[in-house]
Amino acid sequence: MKPQPGLSISRSDSGGWTATHEIVIKASDFADVKDNFARGELLVDLDPSVPAPFDDFLRIDTVQFVRSEGDFYVFNVTATGGSAQYENDPEDPGLSATALPTYTLTGQLQDVPFSQHPKWKALTDFNKTLLGNIIDGVLWYVIEDNVLRRTSDDEKAFNQFDPLDTDAIAFATRIQQGQTTYQKSSYTWTESTEGADQLTAPQINKLGKIATPRGTPPEATAGRDWMLTSVSQSQSGELYRTNLEWTLSEEDGWDSFLYDT
């Protein structure tokens, strides 16, 4: 095998390393050396001159095979790897000193039912029931008279909202006009790392639990807190790409009875 000049090694923003290298062999030697190009093998086994510390962790990920002139084979090799992302703490795995996480704050709007609106939550249970019946088609709200009927042509008023409860009347008007959802804001905080570690048991177990994000997310007020709502990991060779995502609650925080650790 003849490693070619031009070994290229780069590091991503999240701490993962990727190397590209070109190795030339004689076609007659292919059967003897092809196993050296198996995924997961160390790059240094192909080229002993790979410098430290990359010789310890860069492993073959993908290989492109090209038949060249002169009865030679060219292997374009991509190798990946990284150091440990997390400190070895079984209770709460923190980031290691070598981790280079990137953080992203995302705000977006979601189309959700009126029942999630803060003004709906402030209504009496009785008014919530009436509004639910309008949504279900059990009751018909006559906007101009502010009365509820069992059908659109029923002349008898079934019930009436408290005239002082203007929020219930405002919801009823919109529901009768065909609107039952609104745009609710949602914020997520995402940590991305790349390295040699798979997800830890504590990280897996904290999914769906109230948790404090790492990094420096914006300070939440009015009793808001965060929940770990998404965990994902992909593997490229021996390099693991991990994403943890926390979602900010509404005012008064996530329900601690349901989601506390």
Image: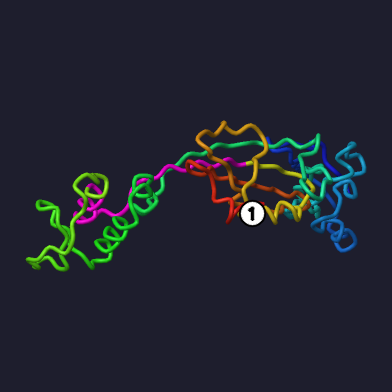
The residue segment tinted magenta is 170-190
Residue at point 58%, 43% (across, down): 226
Q: Residues within 10 Å of mark 1 (few under 14, many from 20)?
A: some
- Please give the name of the residue rendered at 12% of the width and 65% of the height, measured from the top-left corner: 152
**Side (left or right) of 112 relative to 198:** left
The answer to whether 164 appears left or right of 37 in the picture is left
Q: Measured along the vertical axis of the image, is residue 10 above or below residue 211?
A: above
Residue at (90%, 50%) from the top-left corner?
45
**What is the quadrant of residue 119 in the picture?**
top left
Q: Residue 81 location in percent, x, y?
A: 79, 45
Q: Of 51 and 22, which appears nearest the observer?
A: 51
The percent position of residue 28, horizontal first and vertical second, equals 87, 60
Say if the magenta span includes residue 137: no
Q: Is residue 254 left or right of residue 132?
A: right
Q: Is residue 195 or residue 224 the one in the foreground?
A: 224
Task: Please state the horizontal and vertical placement of residue 114, each as a whole percent of the image.
Answer: 34, 52
Could you say whether the residue bearing mark 1 is in a helix, strand or loop? Answer: loop
Rendering coords of residue 199 (x, y %):
74, 53
Q: Vertically, is 203 above or below 158? A: above
Q: Which residue is mark 1?
A: 207
